[in-house]
Image: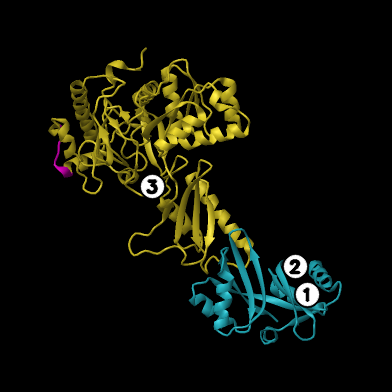
């Protein structure tokens, strides 16, 4: 049985794969040097010309690209294609209210669709499947990324997006969904709601679940597989690089995520020194895109912590595997699939009259859903002898956070000086999730 | 005609009231009247004390958030319908009561109602016009 969407490229011998990577890397570096002033300056400053890239090892001579560089180039500064060639724009939340913007050419959308289709097949889905896509549709890449991949695969896609869980369960039953795509925590929430509705979701036609956009664990995989009666597969992606489908576990091993190396070159570095670490050692994942036209990125620092393995895989794919993400090298939180930086909450708080930036974010997971509590100290500037004034203030902060970040939170007012002050970096986050 | 009240923010956790009353007690401050408004997360303790500024200072020194508000103390005949006549008079002039609490005078046996209005001066005018007995702050502090 054909398990590959693109057998030739997915099983390309390493030597041929690396030769292809070098050719594509050279073309990408030439492209950004010619079209993106940021990269021309960065390469000139590093004393490197595109023609100096003679081997894959030369990649390490190139400068990194960071999320800050993307912010500084807001919105289109890093685009390497003219706007008339850009057919789609996505964005992810930024730290100060401005999002990080990415653009896709028609060819980029085709590449993304293929890589997502490959990912579906690696996960055990195929033409004829009914794919229940609960990733959010919109600026977030999850919904549309999975959608185009499902169509490319030739499956029937249900673009149900997020929310309205009862209706999701009904449609899943009535439409005969066989593949579920959503965040891992939402899958558990779906399973619980199904039990509450008296629906036996384990006997449904669901066979495969493809879960990503937030960190999860092997323990959670066990729980999801037991509660939903399907194979739970980890998928990785980020909008800066493409969206979902950058890397995927194969159903044969469920051990490490194949990163599509004919389109991306992964490296693992020590986040402190920027130097590469040995194979198998943990560090920060750095990705260079080698086929993107809209916004190619050289050595993009993902801030995700993982390791790489080049060991052969039972599925026959020759592309290396990255381990399940085990953390971040910055303070970004992922709450119900939404990226949240503490500094974003801080900038909202300081805009609210009288609020001092003494706050603490408490993240937890209750009934399989992430919760965010924002503790705010009550000083004389916001204190009132009337209950309703303080309650209005809490509601206002909750609304601003929801409007700006798309995350539901509860604000808890606390006495002054109850949030710990520290000498160095303030402790702004307490993450109680057991992943 | 107005009475100074202090309000203190307290989290809903054990021992906070005990802590505040201990601080005031050690500073030799006498509590004349109090009311506690609470939600599931926090509460606001409102106090009439004999030494307003001193109470505010000692509590702030201990890290509490304290504010001072002007309220109105009205003497009410301790008999059925006593409070109702006051509220009816206020209602006729469309004056809103933000909150209120009551205590009984030590001597004389009349009830005293502490009112917090959104329009304090207008309320005082109405109460005076209707011949209600408004207690001066000094009298309350030294009661």
Q: Is residue A226 left or right of residue A424?
A: right
**Residue A23 x, y percent position in the rendering:** 19, 25
Report the span colored magenta: A45-50
The numbered mark 3 sits on a residue in which chain? A
Q: Are marks 1 and 3 on the same chain?
A: no
Q: Residue A429, located in which quarter of the rendered image?
A: bottom left
Q: Which residue is mark 3?
A: A332
In x, y percent, where is residue A254? 36, 28
The circle drawn on residue B126 is: 1
The x, y position of residue A133, in whole percent, is 49, 27
Name the chain under label 2. Answer: B
Nearest to the observer: residue A162 or residue A415:
A415
Q: Are marks 2 and 1 on the same chain?
A: yes
Pick the front one: A206 or A359 = A206
What colour is chain B? Answer: cyan
According to the picture, the residue beneath numbered tag 2 turns out to be B95
């Amino acid at each position: 049985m054909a398990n590959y969407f693109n057998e030739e490229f997915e099983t390309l011998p390493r030597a041929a794969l690396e030769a292809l990577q070098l050719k594509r890397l050279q073309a990408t570096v030439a492209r950004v040097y010619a079209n993106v002033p940021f990269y021309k300056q960065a390469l000139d400053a590093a004393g490197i010309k595109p023609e100096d890239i003679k081997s894959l090892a030369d990649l390490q001579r190139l400068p990194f690209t960071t999320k800050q560089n993307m912010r500084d180039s807001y919105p289109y500064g890093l685009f390497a294609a003219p706007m008339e060639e850009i057919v789609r724009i996505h964005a992810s939340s930024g730290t100060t209210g401005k999002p990080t913007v990415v653009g896709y050419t028609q060819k980029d959308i085709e590449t993304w669709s293929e890589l997502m289709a490959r990912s579906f097949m690696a996960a055990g889905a195929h033409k004829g499947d009914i794919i229940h896509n609960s990733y959010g549709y919109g600026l977030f890449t999850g919904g549309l990324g999975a959608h185009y991949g499902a169509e490319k695969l030739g499956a029937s896609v249900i673009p149900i997006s997020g929310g309205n869980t009862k209706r999701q369960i009904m449609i899943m039953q009535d439409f005969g969904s066989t593949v579920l795509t959503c965040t891992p925590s939402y899958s558990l929430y779906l399973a619980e709601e199904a039990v509450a509705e008296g629906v036996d979701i384990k006997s449904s036609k669901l066979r495969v679940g493809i879960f990503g956009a937030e960190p999860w664990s092997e323990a959670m995989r066990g729980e999801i597989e037991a509660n939903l009666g399907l194979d739970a597969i980890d998928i990785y992606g980020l909008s800066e690089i493409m969206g979902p489908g950058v890397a995927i576990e194969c159903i044969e091993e469920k051990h490490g995520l194949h990163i599509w190396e004919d389109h991306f070159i992964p490296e693992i570095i020590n986040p402190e020194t920027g130097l590469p670490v040995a194979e198998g050692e943990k560090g920060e994942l750095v990705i260079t895109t080698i086929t993107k036209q809209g916004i190619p990125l050289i050595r993009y620092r993902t801030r995700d912590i993982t390791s790489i393995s080049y060991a052969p895989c039972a599925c026959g794919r020759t592309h290396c595997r990255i381990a399940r993400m085990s953390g971040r090298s910055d303070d970004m939180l992922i709450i119900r699939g939404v990226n949240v930086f503490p500094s974003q909450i801080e900038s909202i708080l300081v805009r609210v009259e009288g609020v001092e930036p003494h706050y603490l974010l408490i993240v937890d997971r209750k009934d399989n859903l992430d919760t965010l509590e924002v503790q705010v100290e009550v000083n004389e500037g916001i204190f009132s002898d009337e209950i309703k004034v303080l309650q209005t203030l809490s509601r206002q902060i909750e609304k601003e956070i929801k409007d700006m970040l798309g995350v539901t939170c509860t604000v808890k007012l606390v006495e002054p000086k109850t949030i710990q002050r520290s000498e160095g970096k303030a402790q702004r986050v307490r993450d109680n999730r057991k992943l | 005609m107005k009475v100074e009240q202090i309000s203190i923010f307290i989290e809903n956790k054990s021992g906070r009231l005990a802590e505040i009353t201990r601080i005031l007690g050690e500073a030799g401050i006498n509590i004349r009247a109090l009311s506690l408004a609470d939600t599931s997360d926090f509460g606001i303790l409102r106090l009439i004390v004999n030494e307003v500024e001193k109470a505010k200072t000692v509590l702030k020194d201990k890290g509490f958030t304290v504010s001072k508000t002007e309220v109105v103390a009205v003497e009410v005949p301790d008999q059925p319908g006593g409070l109702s006549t006051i509220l009816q008079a206020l209602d006729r002039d469309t004056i809103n009561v933000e909150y209120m609490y009551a205590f009984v005078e030590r001597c004389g046996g009349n009830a005293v109602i502490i009112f917090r209005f959104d329009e304090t001066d207008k309320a005082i005018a109405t109460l005076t016009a209707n011949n209600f007995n408004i207690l001066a702050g000094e009298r309350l502090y030294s009661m």
